Amino acid sequence: HPDGKRAALTLSKDGNTEIYVLDVKTGAINKRLTHHPATDTSPVWSPDGRQLVFVSDRKTGAPQLWIMNADGSGAAALPQRGGYNTSPDWSPLGHQIAYCTMVDGGRFEIMLLDMRTENVRSLVRGFSNRSPSFSPDGRRIIFSSNRTGQYGLWMIDLDGGRLAQLPLGEGHFSSPSWSESTE
């Protein structure tokens, strides 16, 4: 949560995968947010802490993006493209959500949903692109891609410009998360 006192997480207890809120200081579970027989995972707080975007297979049987209020009320499917959507990240400015959608052959594209207009557009195509994470200023996205044969980390501007690989050397790089500097 933006206040740093709470964390949203997925727990598989009581026989189902649900989303809960945890008190960071004590480790106590404050509240169960979802109560649905579907699988609910990957919660991400909005920048103002009033809502969460999450992934659920309710209604379609495949992962889709949903939104709910911070108290767990008002769950609704978001406008999105694709039948298998995962890895949401909310922009720091609060009006966009980046996510991955599976396309033919099991590859993933990175999509952008504009919450104001409900417009969805593809940002990164080709190869398999995963785990988008917004820069702290909301102008770029870092993600993992196999466009060079193995998974490396790449950055791109929100308009699709300045696609560049991070020079990290040999290895398999995945699941980046961009945060503000603590220095």
Image (spheres, rainbow, N blue to C red):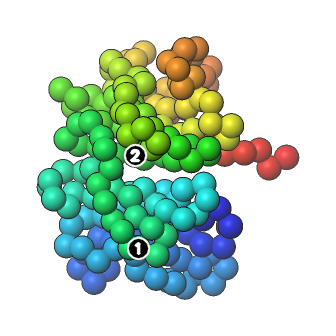
Identity of the residue drawn at 24% across and 73% down: 36
For the residues bearing labels 2 and 1, Cβ distance under 8 angstroms: no
Q: Earlier in the sequence, mark 2 or mark 1?
A: 1
User: How far separated are the C-alphas under marks 2 and 1?
Assistant: 20 Å
Kindly identify which residue carries mark 1. 72
Rendering quarter of residue 130: top left
Kindly identify which residue carries mark 2. 87
> Percent from the top left, x then y, of residue 35?
29, 77
Identity of the residue drawn at 67% across and 41% down: 136
Q: Quadrant of the N terminus?
A: bottom right
177 sits to left or right of 62: right
Between disc 2 and disc 1, the foreground one is: 1
Q: How many marks can you see? A: 2
Is 73 in front, or is 173?
A: 73
Secondary structure state at the residue bearing disc 1: loop
> Percent from the top left, x then y, of residue 128?
34, 26
Disc 2 residue type (three-letter) = Ser
Q: Is residue 93 above or below residue 18?
A: above
Label 1 CA crowd tier, 10 Å (few <14, some 14–19, many 20+):
some
Q: Can residue 24 be seen by looking at this rendering?
A: yes
Q: Can residue 9 be seen by looking at this rendering?
A: no
Identity of the residue drawn at 56% across and 47% down: 94
Is 25 in front, or is 63?
A: 63
Secondary structure state at the residue bearing disc 2: strand
Disc 1 residue type (three-letter) = Gly
Identity of the residue drawn at 77% across and 44% down: 181
Rendering quarter of residue 135: top right
